[in-house]
Image (cartoon, helix red, strand yellow):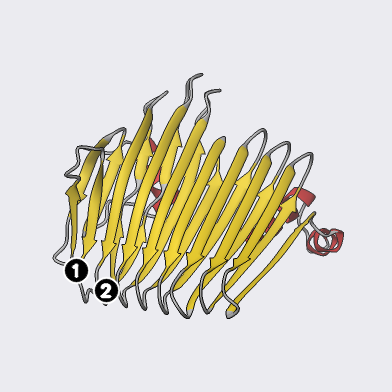
Amino acid sequence: MKLTNIDMNMLQAVTDLKKVPDGAVNIRLNGEAVVRSSSPNIEIRSRTDGRPGFEVEVKAGTRGEKVHVPVLVTQDAYKEKVYNTFIINEDAEVEIIAGCGIHNSCGADSQHDGIHTIIVKENARMRYVEKHYGEGSGSGKRVLNPHTEVIMEKGASAEMEMVQIEGVDDTRRTTVAHVGEKANLKIIERLLTQGQQEAESDIEIVIAGQYGNAQILSRSVAQQKSQQVFRAALIGKTACTGHVECDSIIMGQARIQSIPQLDAEDAEAVLTHEAAIGKIAGEQLIKLMSMGLTEQEAIDLIIEGFLR
């Protein structure tokens, strides 16, 4: 199936791709896998339990490969729930480029719910990038609700970058992770809300393995009358380390709630957190405007740098 200009624009927004890549790739468009191919080391297959979605399995010992699995919704008032499973086998190293774009031009809502299970096996390493984007002239909402469960086995390492670019009217983001012995998990979340948009993010990481480590780093910007709620919980069950950091810029009549939670169940658990919510500093604007930028250009530049 040939992708339209709208499809390709959204594909670039959520993956930075200007064309369909070679190698392992699965592009889902309005409920169908319109592009699917595996590589010698990465298999993409349909689920065997009858539910919509796919399974991605990376062979043990794989090095330096990528897999692209974006979702595009361009059919007006389209709603779906998809179940995807990723298995990164022992000693593998892989980058997963996911993301979802919704184009909605009608008065009814469009929605994508992605239910993800990610298993990073012993000594495997994964980088996961998921971008969300919405567009369209319709008054109907663009709704994205990702639910992700991550299982980190002994010695595994993962960095997950979860980004909401713009145009998403409503999102409920849930991430639950279990970190094993000497495993390391870093979750980076960046959110932008505008207008009347609402975003709720709930992250819980259980560090159950001795000497495990987890980090949650969140940066967000809330503009106009948008609302954000960020909850982050670290639960240390043994000798481990963990850190939660949340920085937010609030503008206009927006509202932000930041709720960090630390739960140490062992005397050797070292858990820390820090959070800050504030407006753009006036001296930053003055400095940039003195260099020839308009006030809006200065604001846009500060926000871009903050969310980078």
Could you tell me residue 215's position as x and y percent? Answer: 55, 69
Looking at the image, is mark 1 or mark 2 earlier in the sequence? 1
Quarter the C terminus occupies: bottom right
| Residue placed most toward the observer, 201 or 179 | 179
> For the point 31% across and 33% down, which residue is it?
30
Residue that label 2 marks: 92
Residue that label 1 marks: 59
Circles 1 and 2: CB atoms closer than 8 Å? yes
Could you tell me residue 255's position as x and y percent? Answer: 74, 42
Q: Judge left or right: residue 57 versus residue 286.
A: left
Q: How many marks?
A: 2
User: In the rendered image of this protein, does residue 62 appear above or below residue 257?
Assistant: below
> For the point 51% across and 19% down, which residue is it?
107
Residue 180 sits in which quadrant? bottom left
> For the point 37% across and 78% down, which residue is it?
155
SS of the residue under disc 2:
loop
Residue 168 showing in the rendered view: no
Label 2 sits on what residue type? Answer: Ala
